[in-house]
Image (spheres, coloured by chain):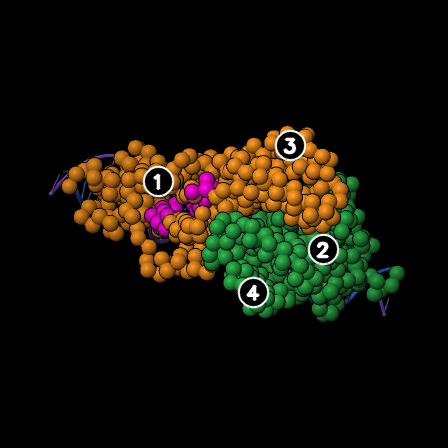
Chain colours: A orange, B green, C blue, D purple
Amino acid sequence: MDIIDRKYRILQAIIDDYILTALPVGSRTISRKYEQKLSSATIRNEMSDLEELGYLDSPHTSAGRVPSNKAYRLYVDQMLRPMPLSVEETEFINRCFDRRMHQVDDLSMRIAKALSSMTHYTAAVMTTTPRNEQVLSHLQLVSVSDRRALLILVTRSGAVKQSLLDLGGRVAPDELYSVSRILSAQLEGMRLSELPGALLRLSGGCETGIHQIVRAMAEQQPSQNQSDVVALAVGGRSNLLSFPEYSDVDKAKALLSVLETREKVVSLLSHNGEMEISVRIGPETGMEETKDCSIVTASYRLSDGRVNTLGLIGPTRMQYGKALSVISQVGRSLNTLIDQQGRDE
Amino acid sequence: MDIIDRKYRILQAIIDDYILTALPVGSRTISRKYEQKLSSATIRNEMSDLEELGYLDSPHTSAGRVPSNKAYRLYVDQMLRPMPLSVEETEFINRCFDRRMHQVDDLSMRIAKALSSMTHYTAAVMTTTPRNEQVLSHLQLVSVSDRRALLILVTRSGAVKQSLLDLGGRVAPDELYSVSRILSAQLEGMRLSELPGALLRLSGGCETGIHQIVRAMAEQQPSQNQSDVVALAVGGRSNLLSFPEYSDVDKAKALLSVLETREKVVSLLSHNGEMEISVRIGPETGMEETKDCSIVTASYRLSDGRVNTLGLIGPTRMQYGKALSVISQVGRSLNTLIDQQGRDE
DNA sequence: GTTAGCACTCATCGCGTTTGAGTGCTAATC
DNA sequence: GATTAGCACTCAAACGCGATGAGTGCTAAC
């Protein structure tokens, strides 16, 4: 029995216990519950070493010890044993994907609800499309009223985008239809990011009637360009209030307020490089308000270039094993659902 | 100076003070701050009467008094002096409606944010369409992939509904277009609520190719029927945590959890009969979880039958004057914006 | 290297005391 | 008869304080 190995095991025991109880853990607890061969004094020595190494903090002299962020990092990187979901949990996930979904928005919300109710953390689900990878399949203008039309863009991969156009004057439905055909033919195969420019170029050379329409379309585009977040849903915010770390209402408020700000949620979900699954701990979340939180995200790139990102946010004292297995299982189910749905492309 | 009038004024002073401070108010406070002509003993007698009449409660013998729900009711119905918004506030509202909106969903959220940031309460914004009042103007099927199509329904009033159809097999875009034309002609002028029946009847008499499509459309419809809530946004949930009534985390959690449940929010917003503006106090909100809350809602029926409902939710100790003036001002601005937008129908 | 023993620390809890804002009642005053 | 001064009484909240106990670090013995 290696001595290094023992330190390692003790650290793991401390983290496990702290994650479970949220109470600083003392040497006697470890000696009784985890390492019965060793006396509390021995554990004490080891803990003293671990503190020196930066893995433990002590809130004050006579409390127990608390894992540092460095400890959580080690825990996540090396100590995590895969923790399979129970049958009930797997069934629960499957039920969520059971009924055919009809509204696209609704799905993110349903997944966020599922994630949060399974983990008791707050969940966020985001779909993004890198605009410049999307290629137009065809477009159509649908008359909505005399001066307004709905512009529908369908990409090669089957994603649908739409926006309401103000045509600036009366346009007959039939005319809209023929313009649709012409533009569709002209623009097919073009990247969405190139559309505004192309439309402007086109609008120069055409008769005044069409000019009007094309102009309106070109003007519309930039506003969509600001952000490529297609859908965002957050669920289970109130879960956070169950954790003792948020029994202080001010802390809770600060965090909840982040979770109500779309841009901040997006940025929390975004920072995960090219990893499929990422765990960010405390300051690694990159936001002052979440320096005591951890965020687990999973990103799945669909064949059409869209990216689905699932995220769980909770205190750094997070059940990482559970969070990771739930999020990856849900992510997988989501992917197969979408693949199934897109199998006809 | 009428004696009844005096009781009335004292009650009003108590409510005003309690709304401001959240602290039980005592006789001396009133005598010093509001009725300097009267001694605290006199106020005490009056307060005793008011308690007997059911307008005041005392948390315990030696605390001050707290307004009862009955008192708030009287306050809202009779004592509220209209409280005009400041110039800054009016400007703030106007700014919210300034930039042309492009995405429909976004608007509700923006209004909810504005309402909540102006009042410091939680705001909800809902748009509903009574299905059976909506009349189809035309419909169109847009090909999305080989087996899937986007169904777009446009109502006479210019509202747009859409859903994704699984066609159950390969259908060519051209075919979709011609089916669109036929169906559009056949179904134009029909109420949306009658569509599923009509579609089923049609699907009987047509060739197999079309049958498939129409069938898919008919099956799609019921799922939209479940609810006629078109858009729902909630903003400023975290505001609630600033109020001393929610310094108890459990109470806060219970309420926040209601505000995360779509159906509950909808039902909280819905119960306001045919009133344009309604104030519900405590148990009048009709939900156990909100028995210590008040809800102010404003509903505006648009010319197309859609109804916009704005709501503010906060503790019963709410600044009703402020809430009412903000909500009605925002409601009015919203209405003129939409009227302007719809002036071309 | 391990552990028993011991002195020391310090947050938390229970408890009696004080404080002060409040009430209700009564008797005097206007 | 309404108003008010005065007074006894109540009770939550604040305060002080010793006891408790979970924890540590250190030392000496095994």
Residue A114 lies, in percent from the top left, at 44, 55
| Quadrant of the snapshot with the N terminus of chain A | top left
Does residue A323 show up magenta in the picture?
Answer: yes
> x and y percent of residue A254 in the render?
54, 43
- Circle 2 packing at 10 Å, graded few (<14), some (14-19), many (20+), is some
How far apart, in angstroms, are the residues tagged by discs 2 and 1? 57 Å
Q: Is the residue marked by circle 1 packed among few (<14), some (14-19), or many (20+) residues within 10 Å?
A: many
Label 1, on which residue? A72
Q: Which residue is mark 2?
A: B157
Q: Look at the image and give the residue range highlighted in magenta.
A: A303-330
Q: Amino acid at mark 1?
A: Tyr
Q: Chain of mark 4?
A: B
Q: Earlier in the sequence, mark 4 or mark 2?
A: 2
Apparent side of residue A21 relative to residue A147 in the rendered image (left or right): left
Residue at (82%, 61%) from the top-left corner?
A: B6
| Residue annotated with mark 3 | A202
